[in-house]
Image (cartoon, rainbow, N blue to C red):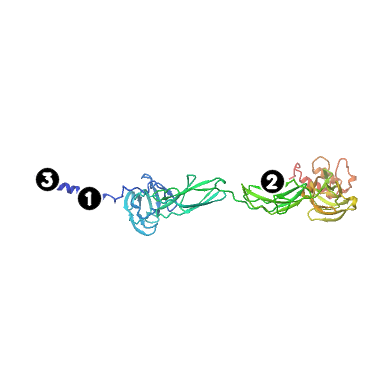
Amino acid sequence: MDLRWNRFVEFKWISLLVIIFTLLIGLPAPTNAAAPNLLAGETLTLLTGNSTTAMTDGDETTSYTMSGTQLLYDFGVQGKAKSYKITYSSADGRIFKYSGVRSGLINSDSLPASSVKKTVTGTFPSNARSVFIGGYTASTVMTIYEIEIYGENDTTPPSVPSGLTGVAGDTIVNLNWVANSESDFKHYNLYRDGVLLKSVTGSTYVDTGLINKTTYKYQISAVDTSGNESGLSEALNLTPVAKAPESPSGLTVTVVEKSIVISWTAVKDADTYTVYRSTESGGPYSSISSGLNGTSFKDSEVTPGVEYFYVVSAYNEDVKGTDSKEVSATIPKNLNPILNVTINEESVKVNELFTSYISLENVSDIFAEDFTISYNADLMDYVGFEEIEGYKVYNESKGTKGTIRFIVASQGEEYGINKETTFLKVIFKAKAIGTGTVDAIKCRVADTINEYDIEEVGCMQDSVIIKGPDDVNRSGSYTLVDLAISGFYFGKTAAETDTVNHVADQVVDGNINNDDLVYIVNQILINPNYEPNM
């Protein structure tokens, strides 16, 4: 019985060893299952730029398919990763292990070809820092269902970042700090007013879109590849402020009536402008208007004969820019001249003459005038001028684009102009239908001491409506009948026609000729109510 019992025990031990050996052969390499999965739930970014969690979500029903080797993962420090477990299907694949970031190849493991889902495990050398996974060739298609990489459970956070400094600008803050030196450093968390603003890898950050005159509190922490976060740095308070605008340029001053108008060129980033004035060149200046949104200001609180000096400053919110260059102006004493152009007729007909009366008002002891008038040369012709007693034209210069310059002088002390006075008549002839304008565009007058340029608002204009003659039979519309009537009268004088019922002399030259018939035909062609014979 002892012999049989010994054989039974021996058989049991042998059977147990066979079972253990069989199990060991069928088991994958150890995976350090007790160690944490470094990739659990992490978003992986491939070399193609695509991002996915399908390979790390713990669910083998999800997967990611790629061509060639696309997945590179950096553990941040050597020796952190211990083992791996990968479930895949592929024609063939590899796992490359590096001591650096895809540099310093240590070794590689084969991922045998498998058309169905397959799980392979393996280990990492102690000096491994990064892993490169994918198909064996660039054309190899590989589907990965799950990757688990086990390693040390690092619980030591990086050191607290130091040296946080910054500069506040216009709606912007520039931050800098001393970079951390840990080998497993991953990124910094930047907090603004206690709320996570951004995760950055560098040691600088530009925070934009801020509200000026608002104080912001900044702190930073460091995070390592295991997700450990350091404490917060010392707080840095910064207040953005508006940028000081440039100095206004292009200042001009214009005397208008009894006021001085100051104008300038708009300044970039300026919200408002302030105008300063002094009665002495170089100041001191006093503010006479602030909070201006436009680029001009009319100073009406002035005394004629006093010279005023002006500078303008631009403001961006409450920040004042430098003063502009100084300009000055003086309101002439008792003088605000106006040169009038007056046409008495409201309307005239083609070929009729009409007169523009030139006069001065609001002046004192004026004895000479130099002015230019413009007119619509396509609607009227300049015929000439008619002098008025006591005033003589000494220059008449005709321009090429409907302008005429006159220089006129009084003929004796009694003809000095002190009230509204007409001193010249300018005669025109209407030649085309439309609204014709006679406009004084440059005006200068002089007394016996000074000469004065009249501002644009004081150089006046007037207009007249130029109408065509009535149609021949006065029906209100040009038709072929009108052409027939003038054809009937062809070769006669206007006086020889039935002027009561007909206006055969269309161009008003006293005769019925081709000019009249051509005019009538042109009017027929532009008559919208005349149906063309086509």
Residue that label 3 marks: 5
- What number is the disc on residue 6? none
Q: 491 and 123: which one is in front?
A: 123
User: CB of mark 1 within 8 Å of CB of mark 2?
Assistant: no
Q: CA distance from mark 3 to mark 2?
A: 119 Å
Q: 185 and 119: which one is in front?
A: 185
Query: In the displayed structure, does residue 534 sit left or right of residue 495?
Result: left
- The nearer-to-camera label among 1 and 2 is 2
Instruction: Give the percent coordinates (x, y) of residue 189.
Output: 45, 48
Residue that label 1 marks: 21
Q: For residue 178, say whether it is visible.
A: yes
- What number is the disc on residue 289? 2
- The nearer-to-camera label among 3 and 2 is 2
Task: Classify mark 3: helix, strand or loop.
Answer: helix
Residue at 37% x, 58% y is: 99
User: CB of mark 3 within 8 Å of CB of mark 1?
Assistant: no
